[in-house]
Image (cartoon, grey):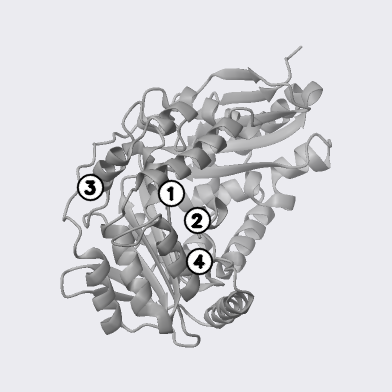
Amino acid sequence: MTKTSQFRQSNTDPVFSRLAISTLIIALFVTFGLTKAAGAVEIQKVTSEKGIEAWLVEDHTVPIIALNFSFEGGSAQDPEGKEGLTRLLAATMDEGAGDLESEAFQTRMEELAISISFSTGKDRFYGSLRTLTPTLDEATGLLAMAVNEPRFDAEAVERMQTQLSARARRNESDPDSIAGRSLAVSMFASHPYARSTLGTDETINGLSPADLSAHHARLIARNGLTIGVVGAIDAQRLKSLLDEVFAPLAETGELVAVSDLEPEFGKQIHQELPVPQTTILVGLPGLKRDDPDYQAAYVMNHILGAGTFTSWMYQEVREKRGLSYGASTSLSPYRHAGLLIGSAATKADRAGETVDVMLDQFRRMASDGPSEEELNSAKQFITGSYPLRFDSSGKIARQLVALQNADLGIDYFDRRNSEIEAVTLEDVQRVAKRLLAEKQPTIVTVGPKQS
């Protein structure tokens, strides 16, 4: 029995078909999360006999293990004309591996309450394992096969192509998807970031098992591999797991160099679509994660549009004027570029007014900045909510991988809140002027014909 696309692509803890096992796993994850939230997260750096490195948070409170990993190179590695190749790779690596065809592989995972999944971003390819300790040996073997020996059988590949191409066709009439693609193309031009991670109906269906096998060989390699492990496993047992799963991989892949870029701004784009509302995206410069101003920008963005009910965007767009159910901003720190994106959806006849109000908030942040009270409130919320990132073993494992990918250091959990506390009003004002002052945003609207 094959798993559904929702189960396969989920990055959250799985819901298994057997109710008793499901209830146990959920209870264990909750218990683990509450335990770790109560104390400090202690990270060990573990290196296997064959040189595979992982960061480990060991905790034997409950018999469960979460392992997350990533490889350098994501959908930006898709060749032109083969958009969606990395996404299809993620969908098929657990659709049969080694001597197990798709149905046998999925059945084995279900019987043992094991979850293995893969996904991709622009810059990296991700994988995860969730298992109980009594089935760790079996889970390790299945993961090793999925990582090293995916089958890419024609029937399984075709089935995944059908699912992904159906999603791509739906996206062609989805306002959010249209707006996101338009913004990416307008800002990234001919750079690989402009290409759709999912691909199109045409490109997805043009891919073959041979394409997947070759792409797997180029992408899935030890160089650039990052691993985070959380749960009831000690360093010695982890070393053997690392060697079994990852040591057989080639040392280096064949990645195509992706260049840094300065996104293009200052465009206004309207995509006509017969829907009741108009979707709005506003693109402005952001920061890459290694920028010294990133924490100040993070605090600024919280005040501007990420702080939900308290943010300027929410207050001005929704609370004071009732233009939208919500308006927000977010930082997008890619490896080769950084963006600050504002978003909202509103009645078509009020789209222009909504855009004007949103732009006013960007200008206000650049010229005036927040008050000391707003800054202190933002920092208090950001530091106080940080433990929510550690309320399950899966979240912690993902955080361990993210820290390594951003080269933030093994002590980042300990110093992160102090970095936020150290942000001053002058820091926020400086970064606001740097990102927003005299900048011409790119504005994308998707909705009914403009009058």
Q: Which residue, given by chain and number where applicable, does mark 3 sit on?
A: 217
Return the disc, 1 or 3, that comes first in the chain's sequence. Answer: 1
Residue 387 vs 314, above or below: the answer is below
**Pointer 3 with pointer 4, Cβ within 8 A:** no
Q: In terms of secondary structure, where does tag 4 sit?
A: helix
- Check disc 3 and give the amino acid type: Ala
Residue sitting at 53 percent across and 34 percent down?
168
Q: Is residue 178 visible?
A: yes
Q: Earlier in the sequence, mark 3 or mark 2?
A: 2
Q: Is residue 104 above or below residue 186?
A: below
Amino acid type at circle 2 is Arg
**What residue type is disc 4 on?**
Lys
Q: Which type of secondary structure does the marked residue at label 2 adopt?
A: helix
Which residue is situated farthest in the top direction here?
451
**Are there few (<14), some (14-19), or many (20+) residues within 10 Å of tag 4?**
some
Give, as a three-letter code, the residue at label 1.
Ala
Q: Is residue 74 above or below residue 282?
A: below
- Residue on which disc 2 sits: 8
Residue 74: percent from left, percent from top: 36, 44
**Residue 319, percent from left and from top:** 82, 43
Q: CA distance from mark 3 to mark 2?
A: 22 Å
Q: Position of residue 243 (x, y in %)?
A: 22, 71
